[in-house]
Image (tube, grey):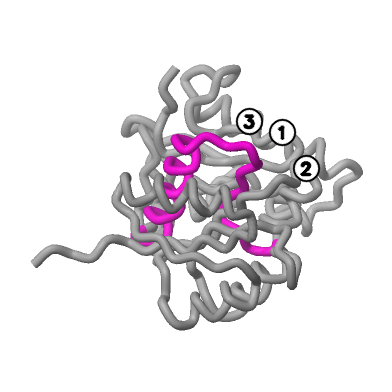
Amino acid sequence: MTEPLPTVLVVEDEAPIRRFLRASLPLHGYQVLEAVTAEQGMKAVMTHHPAAVILDLGLPDQDGLEVVRQLRTWSRVPILVLSARDRESDKISALDAGADDYLTKPFGVGELLARLRVALRHAAGRPSEEEAVVTCGDWAVDLAARRVTVQGTEVHLTPTEYRLLVVLVRHVGKVVTHRQLLRELAGDDLEDPQHTLRMHISQLRRKLEPDPARPKHLWTEPGVGYRLREETPSP
């Protein structure tokens, strides 16, 4: 018996974008549900339990950020924000509210599909138990043993570096904002937390990446935060 195609709920009031996604997503193995307002979108999540939500922020009845916050009080459905708002503060607000990713309009369908696949993979199978060993390319993080290896060789990390890496590992494929990472430094007496965070990320790259100046996995999202990528993007 063939398994049903994953359903993607598109919450978007711009008819041309809905038509584009309605035509594009089924070609790549997704069913599409549509909602024009925040109220319709919330009801659709409750009724149809979609595999993922593509959400515009500029909805006619409610700001999409509030939709993200409300959904996160009772649902872990992956949320990909698709918005014309391109300011860093808008991206940070959406990610801090609980969105899994953020893509600005205009967008390419290839990038949208790639980010959707990552969000679905993260929701379906990322290890969350303390005994899990999480792999990312050549890296392996044993959460129970607090042990990190690169190509089988153990790498020594400071306690702070390890805490930051675990946050990134637990959200692999997703953007983790500066604010989320800075929580891991909250107990430290720091004059310049942002500089300290950059220093620790630089040290992680030096210890884990073959070429720290051109990282394969630990990517910077300028002005927003960092993303741990499972795969190396094609040149």
Q: Which mark is on residue 88? A: 2
Amino acid type, callout 3: Gln
Callout 2 touching callout 1 (CB < 8 Å): yes
Of callouts 3 and 1, which one flags the residue occurring earlier in the amino acid sequence? 3
Do the numbered discs 2 and 3 sit on residues whose CB atoms are within 8 Å?
A: no
Instruction: Provide residue 202's location: percent of width, then percent of height.
Output: 65, 29
Residue at the (33%, 30%) spot, across then down: 151
* Viewer-nearest residue: 182 or 7: 7
Badge 1 element: loop
Residue 222 - label: 1
Amino acid of disc 1: Pro
Q: How crowded is mark 3: few (under 14 residues within 10 Å), some or many (20 or more)?
A: some
Amino acid found under the numbered disc labelled 2: Glu
Is residue 91 toward the left or the right of residue 203 in the image?
right
Q: Is residue 159 visible?
A: no
Q: In which quarter of the image is the C terminus?
A: top left
| Furthest residue in direction left, as rendered | 1
Disc 3 to disc 1, C-alpha distance: 18 Å
Provide the secondary structure element on which disc 3 rests. Answer: helix
The circle drawn on residue 203 is 3
Q: Nearer the viewer, residue 154 or 1?
A: 1
Q: Give the range drawn in magenta.
A: 97-125
Image quadrant where residue 67 sits = bottom right
Residue 46 vertical position relative to residue 146 in the rendered view, above or below: below
Mark-to-mark CA distance, 2 and 1: 8 Å
Q: Where is residue 31 in the image (x, y as percent from the top left)?
A: 35, 60
